[in-house]
Image (cartoon, rainbow, N blue to C red):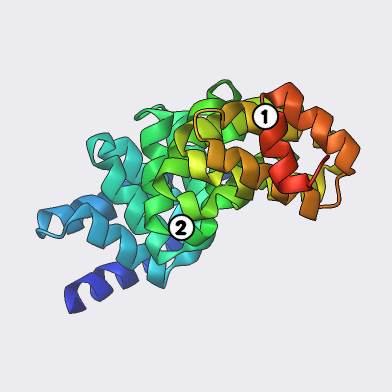
Amino acid sequence: MNKLVRLALLYCSLAQVSGAFGIETKKVTNHTELSQKFLQVQIDQNVTIGRAIKTIVGHYPQQAASIVSTALDLYPDKYKEIIHAAISAQPTLADEVVTMALNKGISSCTSIVETAINADPSYIDFVVTAAAHSTPEQLSEIVRIAVITEPDSADYIVQSLAKAHPSKIVDILQSAISAVPFVGEYVVEALLAIFPNDAEIVITTAVRESGAHREYVKRIIQIAQNAGVDSMKLEVYAINGGATTEEISQVLDVK
């Protein structure tokens, strides 16, 4: 550990020196070279890349993005270790690290998202929104892997992505419920809280996607009622989604 600290101090000093001379483009070039040399020194000293990243990010957060970028360029095959170490040490880097990794194309979107979530689940909303912004064409896969990885955060996942992509509510709901059916009631509650005017599309889609699990259908209807959706409208939305009159009457006491 003392060796790591000494190396980190050396790196910081060298970075400060390089920042004092030359034009801006030269400073960027020097900084990248120093990052590469610093990481290589640690690897040569039999320090794992994950431990090196965690130490640097923990002690010098202002250099974190540059170091992580350099590490991903030098060791793309160790991207999981790098991403996990960086986010574990500095969770606020989650969205930046995910965006960086995706832009470099070092692995699949789902693998990067899953790794980032596992590093610190409490920042899952930052991870999924960053991933969806960088790769919007993979929105459904992002929802799927996020909900599977952290089902207890399904409401946050769906809510965050729906806010960022309101025109994709149906796709988001379908992906979440098909991945983990029991989260239907939670995601419906989350969406109705921020999109009350879209109650029809939310309820109809959720009921339809939960068709293979009838107990979940009734829970979704109950949640919608608790959210203040008009009973007559709710009955229509639920029927359009595939609910039976018996299921609706059991929840709404419709005669």
Q: Residue at x 40, y 26 (%)?
A: 105
Please identify the residue farthest to the front as the structure is shown: 255
**Up-down relation of residue 4 to residue 28 (above or below):** below
**Up-down relation of residue 84 to residue 88 (above or below):** above
Residue 103 position, x and y percent, is 48, 30
Of 67 and 19, nearer the camera is 67
Horizontal relation, residue 92 to residue 87: left or right: right
Of 42 and 226, nearer the camera is 226
Q: Amino acid at mark 2?
A: Pro
Residue 235 position, x and y percent, is 81, 34
Which residue is the site of mark 1? 243
Of 222 and 144, nearer the camera is 222
The quadrant of the picture occupied by the N terminus is bottom left
Q: Amino acid at mark 1?
A: Ala
Q: Is residue 149 visible?
A: yes
Residue 5, numbered label: none
**Which of the marked residues, 1 or 2, is nearer the chain's N terminus?**
2
Q: Nearer the viewer, mark 1 or mark 2?
A: 1
Residue 176 position, x and y percent, is 54, 36
Q: Residue at x 35, y 30 (%)?
A: 106
The residues tagged by marks 1 and 2 sit, at their Cα atoms, a distance apart of 34 Å
* Callout 1: SS: loop
Which residue is the site of mark 2? 121
Density class for disc 2 (Cα within 10 Å; few <14, some 14-19, many ≥20) is some
Horizontal relation, residue 126 to residue 51: left or right: right
Of 195 and 108, nearer the camera is 195
Density class for disc 1 (Cα within 10 Å; few <14, some 14-19, many ≥20) is many
* Callout 2: SS: helix
**Up-down relation of residue 129 to residue 178 (above or below):** below
